[in-house]
């Protein structure tokens, strides 16, 4: 569909025929302004993930939704070893640029970045540790980009199975998604959230597509104005002072559209348990707090452990 309302995504095809919503480069060009810059990630976000990773003895992480590198960079700066993949070469160009800019730092010199997508993750040119990675992360509402072409979540099941296969026994998958229950029930997505701390977001408009009465797709139209960045905003990979302040004009404003498969919390939970096993250890957080503590969270984060014994249970 390519009309003005329901063009579902930026046009382009990524690896293995998966639509690349970032192929036209519009979102990639302003992504750091959308998230508020790598160095302006909210402290609660950083502390939440780094604390959980350290508490679980995690060292080597596979980021399967690297994008411009925002999460991988945060974790590299906090002493984790990173291997990163993404299906969008437009987004990865930013990550490769940052790796080059910071190549004199050992952690960044060792940072592995390869193109690859979730449905053929084993084909990505990465070296998998003999037992598997300590953790796999799929953050930033990235998983919802995967369409449910067949209406049976078969692509989603395959992707999660591939994530699981990359983990060592006892390894942990961190995967998140927006609160699609709230979005579908209210018809509107929250403009700001705990993940991103940006001054540049003008608006996020929400459309919901139903097919035969079933919630099939959510489309978000983003308007981002880079000229509204704070005076201390600096893009990762740029020299200090390289930012040029501009007066707001129509030419500064970037508009892009992204579409999502709106999986409700219960469906997402069942999906994970269907792959990892009903008895696999599974924890859910709402806006970085235990589930139920925040009345209306904007995001959910799932932690699910790969079983380590023959009975499919995690060993303590």
Image: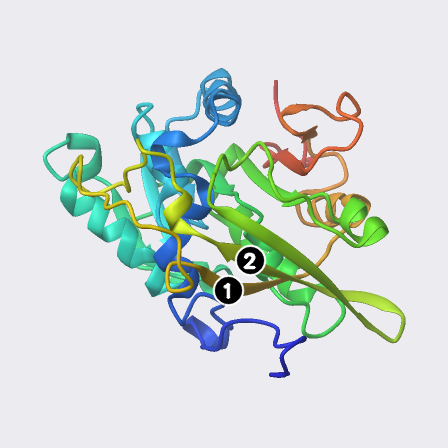
**Residue 147: x percent and y percent?**
63, 67
Q: Is residue 181 rendered to the left or right of residue 299? A: right
| Depicted 76 relative to depicted 246: above or below | above
Q: Where, quadrant-wise, is the N terminus in this rendering?
A: bottom right
Q: Secondary structure at mark 2?
A: strand
Q: Are marks 2 and 1 in contact (CB under 8 Å)?
A: yes
Between the C-alphas of marks 2 and 1, the distance is 5 Å
Q: Secondary structure at mark 1?
A: strand
For the residue pair 29 and 146, the one nearer the viewer reads as: 29
For the residue pair 185 and 66, the one nearer the viewer reads as: 185
**Quarter of the figure with residue 288:** top right
Q: Which residue is mark 1?
A: 256
Q: Which residue is mark 2?
A: 222
Tag count in the figure? 2
Q: Residues within 10 Å of mark 2 (few under 14, many from 20)?
A: some
Question: Which residue is most to the bottom?
Answer: 2
- Residue ID at (60%, 36%): 193
**Residue 135: x percent and y percent?**
47, 35
């Amino acid at each position: 569909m390519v009309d003005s309302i329901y063009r579902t995504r930026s046009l382009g095809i990524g690896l293995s025929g998966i639509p690349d919503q970032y192929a036209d480069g519009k979102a990639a060009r302003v992504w750091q302004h959308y998230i508020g810059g790598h160095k302006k990630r909210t402290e609660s976000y950083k502390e939440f993930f780094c604390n959980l990773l350290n508490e679980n003895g995690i060292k080597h992480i596979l980021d399967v939704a690297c994008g411009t590198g925002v999460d991988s960079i945060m974790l590299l700066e906090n002493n984790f070893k990173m291997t990163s993949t993404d299906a969008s070469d437009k987004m990865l160009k930013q990550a490769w640029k940052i790796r080059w800019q910071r190549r004199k730092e050992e952690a960044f010199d060792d940072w592995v970045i390869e193109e690859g997508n979730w449905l053929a993750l084993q084909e990505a040119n990465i070296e998998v540790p003999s037992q598997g990675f300590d953790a796999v992360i799929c953050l930033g509402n990235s998983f919802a980009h995967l369409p449910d072409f067949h209406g049976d979540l078969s692509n989603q099941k395959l992707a999660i199975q591939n994530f699981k296969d990359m983990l060592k026994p006892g390894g942990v998958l961190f995967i998140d998604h927006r609160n699609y229950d709230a979005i579908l029930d209210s018809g509107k997505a929250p403009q700001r959230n705990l993940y991103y701390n940006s001054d540049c977001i003008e608006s996020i408009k929400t459309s919901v597509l139903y097919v035969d009465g079933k919630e099939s797709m959510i489309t978000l139209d983003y308007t981002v104005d880079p000229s509204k960045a704070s005076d201390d905003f600096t893009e990762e990979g740029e020299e200090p002072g390289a930012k040029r302040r501009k007066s707001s004009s129509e030419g500064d404003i970037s508009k892009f559209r992204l579409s999502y498969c709106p999986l409700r919390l219960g469906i997402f939970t069942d999906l994970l348990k269907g792959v990892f096993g009903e008895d696999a250890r599974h924890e859910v957080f709402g806006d970085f707090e235990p589930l139920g503590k925040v009345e209306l969270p904007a995001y959910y984060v799932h932690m699910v452990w790969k079983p380590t014994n023959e009975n499919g249970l995690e060993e303590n």
